[in-house]
Image: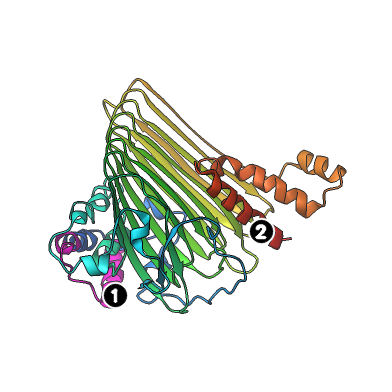
Amino acid sequence: MAVAEAKISALEARLAAVDLPKGGFTAEARAAALARLRGMGLPAKRDEYWRYTDPAAFNAAEAPEADIFDTDEAPVFGALDRVKLVFVDGVFDAEASDDPVLAGVEISRLAEADRADIHWAKSVYGQLEANGQTPVARPLAAFNTAAATDGVLIRVTGRAEKPINLIYLHKSKTSDAVLHHCVKVESGGDLTLLENGPAAARFNKVLEVDVAAGGAFHHVRAQGRDHARRAITHIFARLGAGALFKSFTLTANGMMTRNEAVIEIAGENAVAHIAGAALGDGAKAAFHHDDTVFITHAAEDCESRQVFKKVLKNGATGVFQGKILVKPGAQRTDGYQISQSLLLDDDSQFLAKPELEIYADDVKCSHGSTSGAIDETALFYLRSRGVSRPEAEALLVLSFLADAIAEIEDERIVEDVTSRLEQWLARRR
């Protein structure tokens, strides 16, 4: 009881520090989210799905300060022909953004669209998040639905002419950004969504993706290389028959990052792949990185993949919590889950909690989790051929992360991500 009271008390302090939008077409969803939130309270370390990650930084009434990370690196995805939509500390920057019309899909801003009572996004906003609260409560996602001040609403009826790139810039040490995006991919639609940037001192983001029958959604994001950011992100996705969902996240540095994904495979013959590669170095700042994934198979003949790799050193901590739930009747499910860490010293740690829960008898599901040091035999082989130790370690790290990167379908993006990794690894030498 004392824990529940503490969670509610923390929630009221958090709510008192923000101005909750009333909403137009989102009004009902916001009210429902607030009611859910008050029934749950904010997360606590004693909650099962927060046992490895302390949510205190996300619960605090005020955002902890984060120094601005200055770098002369070229922007991630800068070499790609894409439509840029820029947010600075959670505020849309129209002058720095491209004309959304160039993407060939319907795009609007949440802050502007929410002045009306009617919008196509009403069937998505807060709806997938609400569904994703069962069986595991996700209070910070409910907070986002209630408190989000802006975001993008994307409706795709055909093939997008260009990838859409959401760029998050951080310019204030005390910024506290809450963004909520909705994507609706209609039958036969195809969209690639790119995301990059630190966003704010503290960042809470929800991305709801509804992919109709035969639709395809490709998602690639880069988080880093700033040291002081704290971010919690949520992806809620629903897939119709024959739909495709693929998401990959590259993370480097960051004091605290938790990426949650809740995917419901609702239509037969649908495919959902989610992957991540993380580089954590605790030398300059604490590094804690948590991937928490829940995939539900609710239809026949579907496939899911979870592939997560983390490279950790200097006291960095990596967390993976992944679950595959196969509901009754979801026959011929093919579900695979792998989480691995490469520990470059004895001070870092990797905490993993893989789970399978199966209620159908004709399935092929497996999971595995490993943690180990760099391969000394491979390292010796490279050194014996004149490769320096730092260069050899970088090559082995890239090889270790390759399976996760391979989940990206677009070869241009693979090349861009690989090139970025090579640059980051070179700076660590």
- Tell me how far mark 1 sits from mark 2, CA to CA: 42 Å
Pick the front one: 410 or 277: 410
Q: Is residue 235 magenta?
A: no
- The x and y percentages for residue 399 are 66, 42
**Image quadrant where residue 166 sits:** bottom left
User: Where 44 sits versus 67, above or below?
Assistant: above
Q: Say if residue 228 shows up in the picture.
A: yes
Query: Could you tell whether 201 is left or right of 24 in the image?
Result: right
Judge from the rendering whether residue 214 lies leftward or rightward of residue 352; answer left or right.
Answer: left
Amino acid under disc 1: Ala
Q: Quadrant of residue 406?
A: top right
Assess whether residue 20 is covered by the magenta stretch.
yes
Q: Main secondary structure of the magenta part?
A: helix
Q: Secondary structure at mark 2?
A: helix
Disc 1 designates what residue?
Answer: 13
- Tell me if 411 is positioned left or right of 329 in this view: right
Residue at image point 26% right, 50% down? 128
Question: Which residues fall within the magenta stretch?
Answer: 2-31
Residue in the foreground of this view, choosing between 239 and 262: 239
Which percent across, then down, holds residue 38? 21, 63
Name, please, the residue furthest toward the top. 362
User: Which residue lies under the disc numbered 2?
Assistant: 423
Badge 1 density bin: few <14, some 14–19, many ≥20, Cα 10 Å:
some
